Amino acid sequence: GATLAPIIIATDKTQLTQFSGNKAAYPVYLTIGNIPKATRRKPSKHACILIAYLSVEKMDRSRMNDQQHRSLVQRLFHESMHIILKPFIKAGTDGVEMTSSDGSVRRVHPILTCYVADYPEQCLVACTKYGTCVKCKAPANDLQN
């Protein structure tokens, strides 16, 4: 029999000003959905692992307008995430043999089921304009309703 492993990806662009003088990091984390939520939320349980860092480098904007810059940032993000998540495509389709906690070898199919992000990152993932709803077509002035 095969087993599904619901994969949860989370990103959170973080300012490191207190530690490194106005630097930023953009980590990508992975956890599995069948681990209890209370366990996933405890760093001491190591249920969430760092799988990548996204680029936070400033781009030379001297030869591009704001729209071109936004488009370049979006393309860089999406291409980076494609590279990071590409191994899951084949693994999700074909499965991967893994040893379970009882010692049995099982075929596991990791499937991306959830992407956790704050609002600015949701806009980036959905390629929507900041200030609009990433889930529906509500205009910005209706978002409070």
Image (cartoon, rainbow, N blue to C red):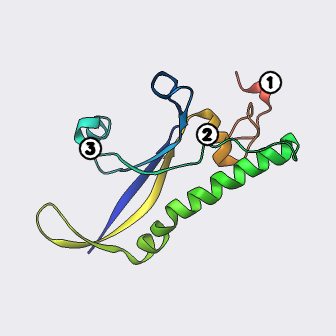
Q: Mark 1 — residue?
A: 141
Task: Please give the name of the residue rendered at 43% of the width and 70% of the height, measured from the top-left corner.
Answer: 92
Q: Nearer the viewer, residue 7 or 145?
A: 7
Task: Please give the name of the residue rendered at 61% of the width and 33% of the height, measured from the top-left corner.
Answer: 119
Separation of residues labelled 2 and 3 (CA atoms): 24 Å
Dot label at residue 14: none
Q: Is residue 126 positioned above or below 81 on the image?
A: above
- Type of the residue with mark 2: Glu
**Tally of numbered discs:** 3
- Type of the residue with mark 1: Asn
Q: Is residue 27 positioned above or below 112 on the image?
A: above
Q: Mark 2 — residue?
A: 121
Separation of residues labelled 2 and 1 (CA atoms): 20 Å
User: How far across and how far down the image is residue 113, in percent?
Assistant: 46, 54
Provide the secondary structure element on which disc 2 rests: helix
Q: Mark 3 — residue?
A: 46
Provide the secondary structure element on which disc 3 rests: loop
Q: Nearer the viewer, residue 104 or 73?
A: 73
Nearer-N-terminus badge (2/3): 3
